[in-house]
Image (cartoon, helix red, strand yellow):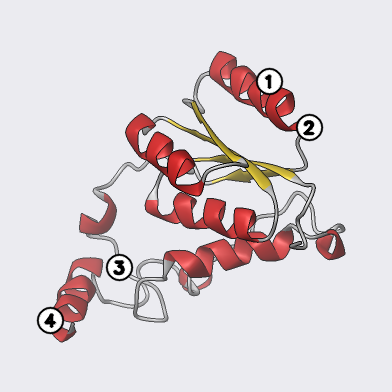
Amino acid sequence: MGELAGKVAIVTGGSTLLGQKVVEGLQGAGAEVVVGDIAVADGEVLANRLGEGVRFVETDVADDAQLDRLVTEAVEAFGGIDLLVNMAAVYLDEGLETSREFHMLGRIGDPEEVADGVVFLCPDRASFIICTDLAVDGGYSALGPEEMGQPLTELLERMEASS
């Protein structure tokens, strides 16, 4: 049994690349997971691939009625909610094609690295860490987007050329 056995998590935005790794990490630690996302096809594939203990509920986090349905379905399916992970976001730029500068590690973080940060906060031994954001961003938020002088597109091109 994992250290999250008996826990129930909701992961909004769980159909994305990063969100899927968080769902996998939580399930791997023993939690049952309800995924809420607007990306229906990806969410259904994820839930089917992971099987028992993972459910998908189409959810737009901007719609309170859909959030209510997500919570209700989690409680009905698994008996409660212990963990809430918000991976849902609205991007005002072009995602990986953004012109914003990159962060201090000079690389894109692996989705597993983000999942590890989320799972770290979930066990009972982290019970006093609440109502906080954990920036799993390689130092980007501490340094600021303008300080590195290296556009993300240049970094991606270098990474693709070396692989």
Front-lying residue, 53 or 64: 53
Q: Determine the image quadrant of residue 107.
A: bottom left
The earlier-in-sequence mark between 4 and 1 is 1
Residue type pointed to by label 4: Ala
Say if 1 sits above or below 142 in the image: above
Instruction: Tell me the mark number nearer the camera, choosing from 2 and 4.
Output: 2
x 44%, y 55%: residue: 18
- What residue sits right under mark 3 in the picture? 101
Helix, strand or loop at label 2? It is: loop
Q: How many labels sit on residues?
A: 4
Q: Is residue 101 above or below residue 11?
A: below
Residue that lies at the very extreme toward the bottom in this rendered image: 162
The amino acid type of the residue labelled 3 equals Glu
Q: Which residue does the image show at 68% across and 20% down from the upper left?
A: 72
Which residue is nearer to you in this view: 162 or 2? 2
Of the residues shown, which amino acid type is indicated by label 2?
Gly
Q: Which of the numbered marks, if any, corresponds to residue 80?
A: 2
C-alpha separation, residue under disc 2 versus residue under disc 3: 41 Å
Residue that lies at the very extreme toward the front in this rendered image = 52
> Gap in Å between the C-alphas at discs 2 and 4?
48 Å
Secondary structure of residue under mark 3: loop
- Which of the labelled discs sits on residue 113, or is there none? none
Label 1 vs label 3, nearer the camera: 1
- Alpha carbons under labels 2 and 1: distance apart: 9 Å
* Residue 110: image location, x then y, percent: 42, 70
N-term mark: 2 or 1: 1
Which disc number belongs to residue 72?
A: 1
Residue matched to label 4: 161
